[in-house]
Amino acid sequence: MLSREENELVCRVGPGTPMGQTLRRYWLPICTSAEIGVPDSDPLRAPLLGQTFVVFRDSNGDVGVLDELCPHRGASLALGRVEEGGIRCLYHGWKFGVDGATLDIPNHRDAEFRQRVRACAYPVREVGSLVWTYIGPPERQPPFPRQAFMTVPEEHRTVFRVNTAANYLQMLEGGFDSSHVGVLHSNVARPGWMTSSFAPSTDGDNPASLVVEDNAPVLELHDTRFGYYYAAFRRTTRRDTAGAEIRNVRVVPFVLPTTRIIPAPSVQFTVLEIPRDDENNSTYLVVHGDKAIDRPKLRAMMGLVAPYWSEDDHTFRASWRDRFGQDRRRMKESWTGFAGVEQEDCIIALSMGPILDRTVEHMVPADRAVTRIRRLLIDCVRRVERGEDPLGVGCEDLTRVAAYDVNLAAGATWQAVVADADSFVKETGHA
């Protein structure tokens, strides 16, 4: 449970807010590469942390992130023309490059003035099928962090963006709640839930697949240089040759500020929760593996289908107007009356309202990973308020950080299966 003041602290992300100032110290995705797919394609109006930007790809294929409003008279550049190496405002034709340089001023022919006036542009990296930007203090810009999904061939990776009308923390906390997997996602996590026999899913692309039927996992947590790992232990009926129990463990990393990696048998799901503003969030689901990705299959498994979601604008449209489209007649064979892992996660977050009141919660030990997120985010805010860097911003190489779902023999440790052993060296001042 958080106090009312703490809840406000971690949920409010606009300019000048403590959490907003903290999140601005990290590189964040602002859109997918596909949203501005080809040179001189339509510009994108892109909200991020309570501000609005315009993202565009110029004639050379370079990407720019600028403040939305033209520095001349404040018209939106998202309505502008992308042509001949820049973006041109419709109002008076002022034209800007991806670096913010003013390239043309049709209604004022003073070259010195043109060189002096610039649009506000931000650092950009296009990596891993995402466009990333840094909108914090220029003098505190951290190195760009590389993650595993950025290292694979493009056909071995796919990205879904889902815009949901809920605060980012509701989506983030749901992703670190291991005990909900076998309940909310019963149909894909434990397909035999409606009978007395448990039948594990055999789908190698299923991120909610459970090896055993145990909805009360015991959690262990370990802070790291980038955030933390949690290990969720579930009991099995298997024994080794000495009669000792073999335990299943699901290991999930939290990469500050808002990233998790979920294990599936044949792929990894990297999920980034990025606040558009206080009451709206963009979830970026990046799936990668060692073979070509079947995007239509994943889209159906996630429940990213009409009328809930479309590729056109990425907006998740469910609401209380029609009870989120729930089919209660199917609930004898469908646990939720919904269909799809991401669909179920989004609907649960939406059902809480735009910003959840966490002062009325009753937490249990299975919620330890959730409470740790809150404390780490508050710790990051306090560090920034002291003039320090938030945790994790110096982590440049995260390519070995991964998630795991394995069975452990008696005496074996989950830490031994984690490839990134260096991650267990914590930063000074970790809470």
Image (tube, rainbow, N blue to C red):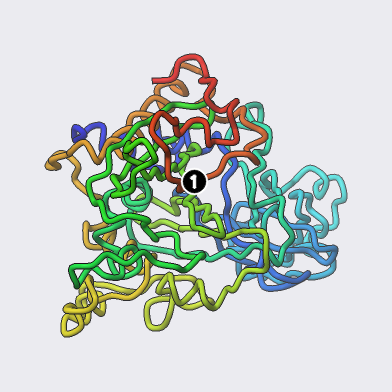
Count how many numbered circles sit on residues in the image.
1
Please provide percent x and percent y for residue 423.
Answer: 56, 28
Return the residue at label 1: 404
Please provide percent x and percent y for residue 295.
Answer: 57, 73
Q: Is residue 108 left or right of residue 296?
A: right
Please provide percent x and percent y for residue 204.
Answer: 51, 65
Instruction: Name the residue located 68 percent from the left edge and 33 percent from the top edge.
Output: 143
Instruction: Name the residue located 37 percent from the left edge and 45 percent from the top edge.
Output: 248
Q: Secondary structure at mark 1?
A: strand
In the displayed structure, 252 sits above or below 266; it is above
Is residue 279 or residue 157 the one in the foreground?
157
Is residue 48 or residue 257 the one in the foreground?
257
Q: Within 10 angstroms of label 1, few (less than 14), some, or many (20 or more) residues?
A: many
In the displayed structure, 290 sits above or below 361; it is below
Instruction: Name the residue located 39 percent from the left edge and 70 percent from the top edge.
Output: 316
| Res 14 visible | no
Outermost residue toward the right in this view: 111
- Quadrant occupied by the N terminus: top left
- Quadrant occupied by the C terminus: top left
Is residue 99 or residue 267 the one in the foreground?
267
| Res 44 visible | yes
Q: Is residue 293 left or right of residue 340?
A: right
